[in-house]
Image (cartoon, rainbow, N blue to C red):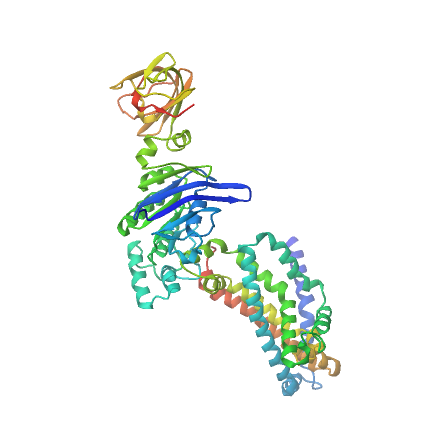
Amino acid sequence: MKRLAAWAIFIFGMAYFILPLIGMVEFSLSMLRGQYSFEAYRVVFADPRFSQTLSYSVLMALLTIVFGALLVVPTAFWVRLKLPEWRPVIEFVTLLPLVIPAIVIVFGYIRLYNTSSWLPLTGSTTGTNLLLLFGYATLSLPYMYRSIDTGLRTIDVATLTEAAQSLGAGWVTILARVILPNVLVSVLSGAFVTFAIVMGEFTLAALLDRPAFGPYLQLMGANRAYEPSALSTLTFIITWACMGLIQLVTRFTKHDKAPR
Amino acid sequence: MSYLSLTHLEKSFGTLRVVKDFNLTVEKGEFISLLGPSGCGKTTVLRMVAGFELPTSGAITIAGKEVTDLKPNQRNIGMVFQAYALFPNLTVAQNVGFGLKVKGTPKAAIDKRVEEMLSLIGLPDLGNRYPFQLSGGQQQRVALARALAPKPSVLLLDEPLSALDAKVRVSLRNEIRAIQRELGITTIFVTHDQEEALSMSDRVVVMHEGIADQVGTPFDIYNRPSTRFVASFVGTLNTLNVQVLDAANGRVKLGATEIALGRSLPSGPVTLGLRPEAVTLGQGNHDTRLSATIREVDFLGSVIRLRADLAGQPIAFDTFNNSHAAPPEVGTEVTLGLNAADLLVIGG
C-alpha cells in the first residue's frame, strides 16, 4: 500500500512537470494546420535576430562564467583559508541577488553609470556590455559561490596550500594548479547554472537595451503564437544539455573517483 | 656554526603565549625530534621554521641566512604533513615533480629526479597512479619523495606517522630514518609518540607549555631527565616520596629502609624517580633491598608487569616471563632489588 502511494505521488509529480512540457512541444509542432511539423522551428531559425541574439547571449554567458570564476574562486579560497570568521557575511552578500530584484540592480547601474555620471559606462556599447556582464555575474553569484564553496569543502584547502607553498609555489600557481583543478567540477556546475540564467535573463538586457536572447524571447512571445513555444523548447534543450554536461564532466574527472 | 638555529623564538596568539623563548641549534644532517603532549607548542615551532607562522619575536637562521621574514615558498624547505596533503588532481609522478616544475626545471631533469625519488621510496612502478589509488603508507612515502625532490635545505616532518596503523608506522619510521641518513638531510620531526622520537632521533627536544624542557640524546633524555615533566612524560616512571636524612651526603629514608644516594640533594622535600626496568624481583646483584606487597599482576606475554605497594606508595616494575616459574600472586610479600644509582632525583 505504501509502495503504491509512493508510486502515485511520483507519477503525479512527474505529470506536474512533464505534461506542460509535452503540451508546449506539441503546440510548437502544430504551426501547420492538421499536421505536426517543424515549421515553427524553421521560422525561428530563419529569423536573423534569433542567431544574433543567441550568439550574443552565448558570448555574454561565457564571459560571465570566466569573470565569475575569476572573482569567486579566489574569494571563496581566501575566505576559507584566511578569513573563516567572515564566511557568514560573504554568504549573506552572495545571497543578496536572490532578494534584490534585477530591476533594482539595473536601475542602480543606470543611475550610477549614466552619461552624466563620473563613470559614463552606458554611453558606449562596450561600457553597457560591461555593465550587463557585471549584472549577470551578480545574478549568478548565489549559485556560483555556493557551488565553489561546496567544492572547496571537499578538499583540505589549508594543508594543500601549505604543501604547495613548501614546494615553492606562489598564490597564482596554487590557485591555478592545485585549487582550481580540484574544484573544477564545482566551477563547471556553477558555470552551467550561470549559462542557463544568462540565456533566459530579460530585465537587465532589456533595460540596458542590449540584443540578448531573453528580450528576443519576450518579443516573440508578445507577437507570435507558435514560435515562442519553439524557442522555449530550444531553451529547455540548452538548459538540459548543460545539466547533462555537468554529469559528464563529473564522470570523466579521473581523480574524483574516490572520496578524499 | 650550526646549520639551523632558532634563537629566542616566541609566538603568541592574542594573549596566549604558545612558544616561550625557544632556543635550538641543529647541525647539518642531524635528525631532531620535537616531543611533547598536545598543545605544548611543538607544531607551532615547526610551522615557524616552515614560514607558515611568523614569530612574535626571535630569529630563524638556515645555513647562515636569516629566513625569519621570508615567505614559505622562498625558504627551500621540504615538509611532510600528517594528512599526506598529496594533490588529488595529480598523479604520483606529477606530485613528486611538482616542486621542480614550480622552479622551472627542464622536463627531462624532472623525469629523472622523479624516477630517482620513486626508487628511493620503493614505489618505482606507481608513478601513473592517483593518490586515491594508494594506501596510507604509500601516500606518505610519496609525500616524503615530493618533499625531498627539490633538494630542500631542511626537511620538516609534522607527525607524518600519526594517521597510519601501528605496523606500517614502525616500518615507515625505519624507512624515513634510513632515507634521511642516506641523503644526510637536516630534519626536524614533530611527534607526541615518545617511542618514535627516541628510536629515530639524534637528539630529542622535550617541550612543555611552550618551553624546551630538555634537549639531549634519546639516551640522556630517558636516563637523565632534567625536569620532573621530562621524567614523567618520557617512558614510565615510578615516583617515590622520601624523607631526607642528610641532604649534603644524599641519605634518604624510604619506608623503613635507608638509602645512600651518594650525591647531594636539594633542600626541601625530595621525590625520587625509578624506571620499571631498574627494579628486579628479589635482590639479585643490587645494592638496595626493599620490601613490597604485590597488588596487581599483568601478564603481557614475554613481559609481566607487576604493581606493588612499597611503604604505602605504588611502584610498577617488569619481569621477563619464565615458563618454569609462575609470577607472584596478588598479596604476596616480595623483596625488590635496585641500585641506588638508578634513583633519579626529580625535585620536590
Q: Could you say which quadrant of the image residue B288 lies in?
A: top left
- Whether A215 is drawn above or below B340: the answer is below
Residue A111 percent coordinates (x, y): 73, 72
Q: Residue at x 43, y 55 (%)?
A: B70
In the rendered image, residue B36, in percent from the top left (x then y), is placed at 42, 38
Residue B230 vertical position relative to residue A209 in the rendered view, above or below: above
Q: Is residue B195 above or below residue A81?
A: above
The image quarter in which residue A169 lies: bottom left
At a point 41% along the width and 29% down the height, the residue shown is B228
Which image quadrant: the C terminus of chain B? top left
Residue reaching furthest to the top? B256
> Residue B202, position in %: x, y?
30, 41
Camera-nearest residue between A119 and A151: A119
Q: In this view, does B281 lie to the left or right of A220?
A: left
Q: Which of B238 and A122 is in front in this view?
A: A122
Q: How many labels does the image show?
A: 0
Q: Hey, which residue is sitting farthest right in the picture?
A: A222
Residue B308 quadrant: top left
Camera sees residue B138: no
* In this rendering, position of residue A226 left or right of residue B238: right
- Where is residue B81? Give x, y as percent: 42, 50
Q: Is residue B178 visible?
A: yes
Q: Which residue of the protein is positioned furthest toward the left in this rendering?
A: B285
Q: Is residue B84 left or right of residue A114?
A: left
